[in-house]
Image (spheres, grey):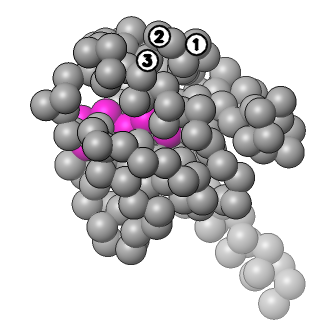
Amino acid sequence: MIFVILGTQDKKFPRLLEAVQKAIDEKKVSKKEKIIVQAGSTKFTSKDMEIHDYMPVQQFEAYIEKADIIICHAGVGTILTALEKGKKVIAAARLKEYGEHVNDHQLQILENFSKKGYLVALEDFDKLDEAIKQAKELEPKPIKSNKQYFIKQLEKEINILG
């Protein structure tokens, strides 16, 4: 199963869903492949994809767990959520030139995560099938959280102030 995640911001990202649909239409992605989409504010219809605008957290997490591959926008929260679950991720940057974001910061996010071997960067939307093949072969590096470090630092600060 492929889970496509476009986030919850008010910015639309039809370009990514158009690429998925094109890959299906061109038989580069099998119609047998179940594709679930959390589209956010992007309005898109497809006979080949199960599209939800938004979904409850439990349903969202269940789809992440079931997914073989996550295709998503290059938002840090989405990427980290998928990587923490050990998922194979293909990420695409929302770009300012298409009105998908206010700037191109997602290009930097994409570059940093892909250079370090965490995910496959989808830069050419016409090559989604190649990205899927790469993702299937990718053994993503485990993500290491700094949460405990930050909690200890915060506790030190609180103790100093208290």
Q: Are marks 3 and 2 in contact (CB under 8 Å)?
A: yes
The quarter of the image holding the N terminus is top left
Q: Are marks 2 and 1 in contact (CB under 8 Å)?
A: yes
Q: Is residue 143 visible?
A: no
Q: Amino acid at mark 1?
A: Asp
**Residue nearer the viewer, 62 or 129:** 129
Magenta-highlighted stretch: main secondary structure? strand
Describe the element under mark 2 as helix, strand or loop. helix
Describe the element under mark 1 as helix, strand or loop. loop
Q: Which residue is mark 2?
A: 127
**Residue nearer the viewer, 151 or 156:** 151
Report the span colored magenta: 67-72
Residue 49, given in percent of the width and then of the height, sits at 31, 43
Q: Which residue shows up at 47% across the image and 10% down it?
A: 127
Relative to 120, does residue 48 appear above or below in the rendering? below
In-image side of 20 versus 86 (left or right): right
Q: Which residue is mark 1?
A: 124
Q: Which residue is mark 3?
A: 128
